[in-house]
């Protein structure tokens, strides 16, 4: 008889699993079960990938130390998804699984959480006549109680009904009239929104999406800001819940999760779980088990929620599908949108990609007719899109980031009892401080970039590596502070509007757990009349009383060397502008610029985003840039740049035989030094994705000696800088 071994994935930078002998006693654990295995000098928690015949000629195998689960914690479909993602993104399978699991499961803790057993009537029990049990009055009384309580009865409730319910309950279960159900602790009840009438475009979208339920399809729900995409989600989700299915909703930012949780519930009994990195270990664990057991009707989460197990997943929604936050930028570099589309295809269920500003990759799939395209061209209800105007800073110079026309618009807005949002994607007080001694900017010694001055702490801080030093002495000696950050604008606003409640939303101000959610809720209630913030403001928030949006500095985005800078700028402008005028009062958007006639700005103002995206797509096609080619970036880091470069030179030599793959570099990264480490990179470009994948797999089988060079591989990078 062929001897079996277990192929186990462990959390290590190794692309394959390791073989172990099964436990000496008991059944062979199936794939998806966690096991504790010896790995080097210590024991690790691993996950069984498969049981297979023991390879011939291998040395003596170590034996699995302990089996941690009776049933798989990772269902077969999710395990297959993880294996696919590891292969697609060329990342070690053990690290992929480790990144997807909640902390408690990674540590080997039990996959069971204390809960409550509830007994409820079955379909046969609902139709049974209690009079047939008149000779057993306790059993008869219990059956009547079960028939009158759809939610079921707990042990405590049963003991209140009779002195000893054990025997009659057992009899009812044996007759198939009652069944036991284990329930995990439920998350907080959602705030159920009132139903809002749909306009014709919403009704058409809902009907088209409902017709897709039960089979795979990928649909772009492309609606202008404020068009009611969430109401469309809610209507389709309601149809799924009525069919007994579950729904996964992926949001790009933690701050959007509470808003979605409260706007998607069907009724007060809807179980909506939330899963993101700000949840405690127990909350993540509970959401995982609620989804796996089928008790969570809806799970709202960020990137990693795409790997959650479900009992009956019937729909995936990816909100703000264009958002770069959906791409993990460290460790396992996956894109949650693309993994979600693959998961939907694998499971044979629909996936909805919602946005006002589609990414160019999604637009390419629309052009290729791989995705369906549903439009919501008008705002929901009486709201209309805001008017956008340019403020020429050549005519109206600004002081501390604010020009006189913008200040006047703020005064009018506040006098009208409305709210205003000011957007500036630069935190701190001033991005550059010129030393009075040297007359030069103060530079980070570890990154060679300018330190940002933070006035509240009187510190100079590097926003790349965290290096900080006091800036108090330089300021006292008359240092020149160049440029504006959110702190500087906030100070000016307090001086201009001393009695106005003002909120600053950036990573310096929003630090504690739940602080962002509380601040956003206060803004929605109208507690703050002016909000100044960074890109946190662009992410699909609904502020009913905002009628004015001011973009303080748009020019820095017009000349960025980054590939995706034009796309990001256009998306940012459309998204942040969309916060204005979402109810009855019309909105206004003011853009401060020194370049009012810049072609890109004029195109965005005078064309629709769809027309602008078509123009960008045609340009990318002409140049053979993504999404019309496929890229991977290999980055190397070392304290000695020459060693990082030498490693990449060797890699390029090994890659030269990759048919259909163009290798460029090595070259310094756009930011060559960060946190004291020099960085270089290779760019791999191919028309065929299979050719790129084959080239990378061949190299990874023999990557060569790396010495002390750290390297990372990024497939489908959002940024090659």
Image: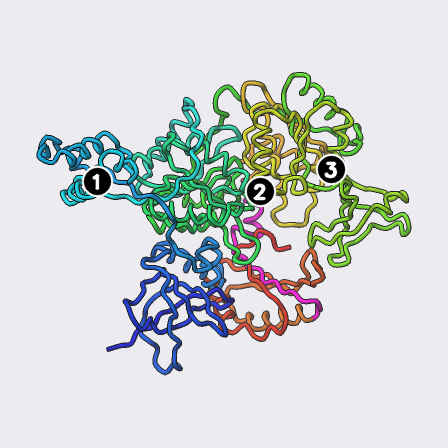
Q: Which mark is residue 435?
A: none
- Please report contact status of discs 3 and 2: CB closer than 8 Å, yes or no: no
Left or right side of 220 for 495: right
In this rendering, would 514 be left or right of 436?
Answer: left
| Residue 122 % position (x, y) | 20, 38
Q: Earlier in the sequence, mark 2 or mark 1?
A: 1
Report the disc number at residue 487.
3
> Where the C terminus falls, by quadrant?
bottom right
Residue at 41%, 45% in the rendered image: 370
- Mark 2 and mark 1: Cα distance apart in space: 45 Å
Q: Which residue is mark 1?
A: 165
Mark closer to the chain start, 3 or 2: 3
> The N terminus appears in which quarter of the rendering?
bottom left
Which image quadrant is residue 411 in? top right
Pair 3/2: label in front: 2
**Number of residues whose C-alpha sits closer than 10 Å to that of mark 3, classed few (under 14), some (14–19) or many (20 or more):** many
Residue contact at pointers 2 and 1, CB within 8 angstroms: no
**For this rendering, which residue is in front, 39 or 583?**
39
SS for dot 3? helix
Q: Residue 640 colored magenta?
A: yes
Q: Is residue 447 above or below residue 608?
A: below
Rounded to the nearest whole Å, what is the CA distance between mark 1 and mark 3? 66 Å
- Residue 646 percent across, percent down from the top left: 66, 72
Would you call the spot at circle 1 few (<14 residues within 10 Å), some (14-19), or many (20 or more)? some
Whichever of callouts 1 and 3 sits on the residue coming sooner in the sequence is 1
Residue at 22% x, 35% y: name it: 162
**Image-based side of 203 in relation to 251, left or right:** left
Q: Which residues are magenta?
A: 614-642
> Residue 65's image quarter?
bottom left
Instruction: Label 1, secondary structure: give it.
Output: loop
Q: What residue is drawn where x is 26% and y is 37%? A: 159
Q: Nearer the viewer, mark 2 or mark 1?
A: 1
């Amino acid at each position: 008889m062929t001897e079996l071994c277990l192929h186990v994935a462990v959390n290590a930078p190794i692309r394959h699993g390791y073989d172990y002998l099964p436990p000496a006693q008991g059944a062979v654990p199936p794939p998806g079960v966690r096991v504790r295995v010896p790995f080097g000098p210590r024991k690790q928690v691993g996950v069984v990938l498969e049981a297979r015949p023991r390879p011939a000629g291998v040395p003596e195998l170590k034996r699995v130390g302990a089996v941690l689960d009776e049933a798989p914690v990772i269902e077969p479909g999710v395990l297959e998804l993880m294996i696919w993602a590891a292969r697609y993104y060329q990342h070690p399978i053990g690290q992929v699984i480790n990144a997807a699991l909640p902390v408690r499961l990674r540590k080997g803790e039990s996959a069971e959480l204390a809960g409550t057993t509830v007994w409820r009537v079955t379909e046969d029990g609902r139709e049974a006549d209690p009079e047939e049990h008149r000779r057993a009055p306790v059993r008869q009384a219990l059956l009547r109680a079960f028939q009158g309580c759809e939610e079921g009865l707990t042990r405590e409730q049963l003991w209140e009904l009779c002195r000893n319910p054990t025997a009659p309950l057992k009899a009812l279960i044996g007759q198939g009239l009652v069944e036991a159900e284990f329930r995990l602790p439920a998350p907080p009840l959602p705030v159920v929104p009132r139903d809002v009438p749909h306009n014709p475009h919403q009704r058409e979208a809902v009907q088209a999406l409902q017709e897709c339920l039960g089979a795979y399809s990928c649909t772009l729900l492309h609606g202008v800001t404020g068009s009611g995409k969430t109401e469309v989600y809610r209507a389709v989700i309601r149809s799924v819940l009525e069919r007994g299915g579950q729904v996964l909703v992926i949001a790009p930012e933690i701050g959007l999760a509470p808003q979605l949780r409260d706007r998607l519930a069907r009724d007060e009994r809807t179980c909506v779980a939330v899963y993101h990195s700000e949840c405690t270990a127990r909350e993540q664990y509970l959401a995982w088990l609620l989804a796996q057991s089928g008790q969570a009707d809806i799970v709202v989460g960020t990137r990693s929620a795409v790997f959650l197990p479900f009992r009956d997943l019937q729909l995936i929604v990816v909100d703000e599908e264009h958002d770069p936050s959906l791409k993990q930028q460290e460790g396992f570099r996956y894109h949650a949108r693309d993994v979600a589309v693959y998961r939907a295809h694998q499971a044979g269920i629909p996936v909805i990609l919602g946005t006002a500003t589609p990414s160019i990759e999604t637009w390419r799939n629309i052009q290729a007719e791989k995705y369906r395209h549903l439009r919501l061209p008008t705002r929901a209800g009486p709201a209309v899109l805001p008017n956008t105007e340019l403020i020429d800073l050549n005519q109206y110079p600004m002081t501390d980031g604010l020009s006189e026309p913008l200040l006047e618009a703020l005064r009018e807005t506040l006098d009208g009892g409305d709210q205003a949002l000011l957007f500036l994607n630069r935190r701190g007080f001033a991005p550059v401080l010129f030393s009075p001694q040297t007359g030069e900017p103060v530079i980070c010694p570890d990154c060679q970039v300018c330190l940002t001055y933070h006035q509240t702490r009187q510190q100079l801080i590097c926003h790349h590596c965290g290096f900080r030093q006091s800036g108090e002495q330089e300021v006292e000696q008359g240092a020149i502070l160049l440029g504006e950050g959110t702190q500087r604008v906030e100070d000016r606003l307090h001086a201009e509007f001393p009695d106005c409640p003002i909120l600053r939303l950036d990573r310096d101000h929003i630090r504690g757990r739940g602080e962002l959610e509380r601040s956003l809720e206060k803004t929605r209630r109208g507690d703050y009349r002016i909000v100044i913030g960074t890109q946190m403001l662009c992410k699909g928030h609904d502020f009913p009383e905002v009628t004015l949006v001011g973009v303080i500095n748009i020019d820095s985005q017009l000349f960025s060397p980054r590939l995706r800078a034009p796309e990001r700028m256009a998306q940012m402008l459309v998204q942040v502008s969309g916060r204005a005028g979402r109810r009855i009062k019309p909105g206004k958007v003011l853009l401060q610029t020194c370049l009012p006639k810049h072609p890109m700005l004029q195109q965005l103002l005078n064309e629709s985003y769809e027309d602008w995206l078509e123009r960008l797509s045609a340009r990318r096609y002409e140049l053979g840039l993504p999404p019309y080619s496929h890229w991977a970036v290999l980055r190397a880091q070392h304290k000695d740049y020459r060693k990082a470069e030498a490693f990449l030179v060797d890699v390029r030599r090994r890659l030269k035989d990759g048919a259909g793959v163009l290798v460029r570099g090595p070259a310094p990264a756009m930011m060559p030094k960060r946190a004291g480490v020099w960085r270089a990179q290779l760019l791999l470009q191919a028309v065929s994705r299979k050719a790129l994948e084959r080239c990378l797999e061949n190299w990874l089988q023999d990557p060569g000696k790396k010495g002390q060079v750290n390297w990372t591989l990024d497939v489908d990078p959002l940024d090659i800088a």
